Amino acid sequence: MTPYFVEYIIKMISQETFNKEKDITTSLINTLLSIKPLANFARSRARKMIIDRANKIGVNWHKNMTTLQGRDWNDDLKQVENPHLKYPDYYLKSFHAYDNGNLGWDAAWELESAAYSVHSTIFSQEPQLSGDRTLRKKYHEVLQQEITKSLENILDSGCGTGLSTFILKEIYPEAQIVGLDLSPYFLAVANYQAQQKNYQINWHHSKAEETTLSPESFDLISSFLMFHELPQDASLNILAESYKLLKKGGYLGIMDMNPQSEVYKKMPRYVLTLLKSTEPYLDQYFSFDIEKELIKIGFSQPKIVPISPRHRVIIAQKH
Ligand SMILES: C[S@@+](CC[C@H](N)C(=O)[O-])C[C@H]1O[C@@H](n2cnc3c(N)ncnc32)[C@H](O)[C@@H]1O
């Protein structure tokens, strides 16, 4: 999901809480963020804003959270977890203001409500419940325009709690769909939600860069908002693994933040430093030349389509 902090910071800028004239430097921000109580305060403000906005658009954050919290998740976890998986160090960092990042229940139970909230103002000044759905819909409009052949096998790489997987299932009901993620907590929630919807989806707990899935077995690999969470070496390895997993003529579709958009181009450096406190690899994401790397790996010239003021779709085909 678009990082909590992006939303918070954009709001702070628009409210001129931070005034550029005062020359708040990157190093000062870094110093402030290294003071734990201050960093925690900023995070808790960002979190409060997300929850307030969720409630404003009609998402009952507290109820959603407590409903999921009330289940016994032990069996769900056992069904999806690969107990032998070794997590890469970069994944063990704090993300999105959760100390244990994506490896915890709170993040899993809150992901859907948070996605609705943080995407609620993308297409409108006024927060709207439909923002998240519209973003996903626009991504699929681009995919459907570019990919005209039928898709039998689809991988959702970095599927989270399944929001991006369920829409794939709705658009391609006949396809065999695999949802892959490194968080077993997210996959447990995804599996539970899929059962509620009666959707047949195979969940796969692994690194997207080392999947153990069969080579040349997918027509489409889709990745929705995963790449901004990755250091560059992991992104490179995932692109290479995706190339290996795709059938000849298969497609890779990526939806994520658009570093070329005016919103991010105009963003002062210190703001990016602030964002880093909840999105540790954002600067690496912003300087990653994904187009060049896709071509080096062997993909066709990728097509890049902006779909919101700050998101873009990348589609590349395996020759
Ligand atoms: C912002 S979430 C997006 C989730 C989902 N695609 C959606 O649209 O809601 C990014 C996801 O990528 C996953 N992820 C990050 N690095 C990964 C990796 N190396 N391998 C597999 N999943 C990864 C995270 O666990 C998280 O679920």
Image (cartoon, rainbow, N blue to C red):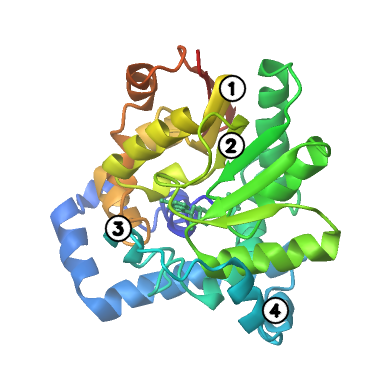
Q: Which residue is mark 1?
A: 250
Mark nearest the camera among 1 and 4 is: 1
In percent of width and height, residue 241 lies at 42, 36
Q: Which of the two discs, 1 and 3, labels the residue nearer the N terminus? A: 3
**Seen in the image, is 38 located left or right of residue 203?**
left
Give the CA distance from mark 2 to mark 1: 11 Å
Q: Amino acid at mark 2?
A: Ser
In percent of width and height, residue 11 lies at 48, 54
Looking at the picture, does residue 3 appear above or below residue 196?
above
Label count reads 4
Query: Residue 222 has which mark?
Result: 2
Which picture quadrant has residue 57? bottom right
**Seen in the image, is 84 located left or right of residue 64?**
left
Q: Which of the two discs, 2 and 3, labels the residue nearer the N terminus? A: 3
Q: Amino acid at mark 3?
A: Tyr
Which picture quadrant has residue 63? bottom right
Please name whichever residue, 84 or 65, is drawn nearer the observer in this view of the structure: 84
Give the CA distance from mark 1 to mark 4: 37 Å
Identify the secondary structure beneath mark 2. Answer: strand
**Seen in the image, is 135 located left or right of residue 235?**
right
Q: Which residue is mark 3?
A: 90
Which picture quadrant has residue 288? top left
